Amino acid sequence: MAESWALEVRDLRKVYPHRPPVEAVRGVSFRVAEGEIVALLGPNGAGKTTTLKCILNLVKPTAGQVRVYGRDHNDQRFLYRHVAAVLEGNRNIFWRLTPRQNLETFAIYAGVPSRLARRAVERWLHFFGLEGLNRETRHLSRGQQQKVALAAALVRETPLLALDEPTLGLDVEAKRDLVALIRRLAQDEGKTILLTSHQMEVVQALAHRVIVIQNGRVVVEDTPDGLRQLFAAQAYVLTLRLPPGTDLAPLAARWQARLEGQTNGEVRVRVMLPQAAALYRLFADLEALGAEVRSLTPDMPDLEEAYLRLLGHPPPTARYPPTSTL
Amino acid sequence: MWALFWTALKKEWAIMRSYGLNFFMQFVTLILVFVFLYFGLGYVGGGPKVSQTQEGLMVGYWLWVGIIMSLSNFSWNVMQYAQQGLLEQLYMTPWRLRGILAVEAAASFVIYFLSNLGLLLFFMLITGRWLRLEPVTTFLLYVATLLPGYGLGYLLAGLAMRYKNIAQLFNVLQFVMAGLLTLPVDRYPWLNVLPFAQGVRMLITHVRHGTLAWQFPWPAWAVLVGQTLVYFALGLTLYGRLENAARERGLLAHY
């Protein structure tokens, strides 16, 4: 049976008519299945927010095709009955209205019939625990405001939800809270979610699939685990016994070595290899240093490391200073 | 449609209440300015025609307040929405941004019309000069005179979206409005093509001579309605172009 796509993006391009013109999106294509959570990942200016806004028709694409539940996104009536979004700082709500007033206003503005709107308002206020908050939203905490913004999008009862940096600016607790709620939206409410985020732990916790965008192009598309696996065999943790006063600088420079720990005359060092075959060269270097290898284990990088390496950045390691000795 | 209007009305009212002190101070300022203008005119004006001029001032000032209040509410809303990222949210509705702005404008018009009536009552109380206002004629002329202002409001909204900071332009426009309301249309009839002029003249005629809505000659109404439709349509068209330009450049959200 053919898979049913909530969203299909084909060769999407956007050139902003600035002087000089800025090519923000250069042929992005991907699909999102119903019930999936897909994350667009990329550095600032990569084109992920422009991609999202082109999908939502908030920015006019230069070329390409976007279909939402099989219908072209230029059918805006259909589009906005099927997609809701929380964008730009996630506080795009009426600050001088209470959470309830906000939800009521957004529901009716979105064309939800009054009777259904009343039910939706109660449901989402309850879902986010906002029932008791009768203050204007400008007086609420940032985490609460973000929940109001999300609830204001959800009262539209659309099956697809687009979230731009949903946890940006939240403290650890509020972030964890919101991530759990977003996961529930997919699991319990069957929502399809397309999100952008810089926060790897958020993407790792939420996304079924990650699409990495750089310079307006899709660099890779995979599951978070798949992305990590891509680099798994290239990172190793070595337990070494070293002669006293060994200078590790050459090792650090050549193999991006990082000291992980030191106990009972043994050191644990993490190294990065361009490919598995380079292990032999590493062993030769260690032998030259007089090091005895006690153990060797492949190390799984976290998503952030995998992502940075994918984009060609050095891994976020604290390297040895050149004069470092043990 | 009724649910949409009612929701917009509740929302506008809630926001207005939230700015209660600001709203009150605005009223006090408007009354003080009126008192200075009115009694100042009486003091320096002299002559037999001063009472007619004072009537004109009262009507003209009342309309000017109505236009400025509606216009400032309209463009201020758009600027606020742009700052809060709400333009995009409102764009993503079946009514599109222009539809939502129209409904909100209609809702705030109701609130401002009622509060403006209170203001006029206050003017009459202070001056002791009771204007002969027939409700239906007054309402029709008030609406028809103010509608071109909403066309201008759309234009300002479009400019705010495309060029962002238009506060200075709005400040200048307040004086342009005052000028448009005091044009000598009796001497130069062609000035009637400009917004507001015809409506002010008809309302003053109503106040002075008790002419009712259906007693005005049809060409007078034709000019007023034509002017209203043309300026409203012009504002809406230019707004549409500016909105498209903002979407093309990805400016709908940023401020």
Image (cartoon, grey):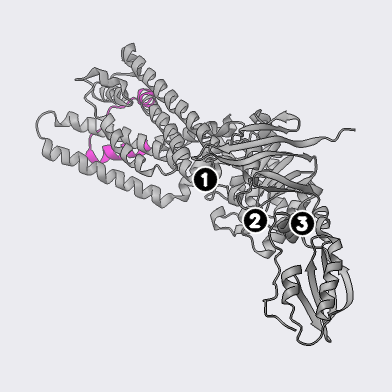
Q: Residue A101 location, x and y as percent?
A: 59, 46
Badge 1 local density, few (<14 within 10 Å), some, or many (20+)?
some
- Return the residue found at the far left: B47
Residue under disc 2 on the same chain as residue under disc 3: yes
Determine the image quadrant of residue B38. top left
| Residue drawn where x is 60% and y is 49% of the image | A45
Task: Locate the N terminus of chain B by quadrant.
Answer: top right
Say if mark 1 contacts mark 2, CB within 8 Å. no
Q: Is residue B226 shown above or below A316?
A: above
Residue at mark 3: A204
Q: Chain of mark 3?
A: A
> Tag on residue A67?
none
Lower sequence index among marks 2 and 3: 2
Residue extending furthest toward the top: B218
Q: Which mark is residue B254?
A: 1
| Identity, as a three-letter code, of the amino acid under mark 1 | His
Main SS category, magenta section:
helix
Query: Where does the image place residue A135, in percent across and percent down from the top left?
Result: 57, 55
Q: Position of residue B159 (x, y in %)?
A: 43, 36
- Residue A132 badge: 2
Give me the C-alpha separation between circle 2 and circle 3.
Answer: 32 Å
Numbered disc 2: what chain? A
Residue type marked 2: Gly
- Label 1 to label 2, Cα distance in Å? 32 Å
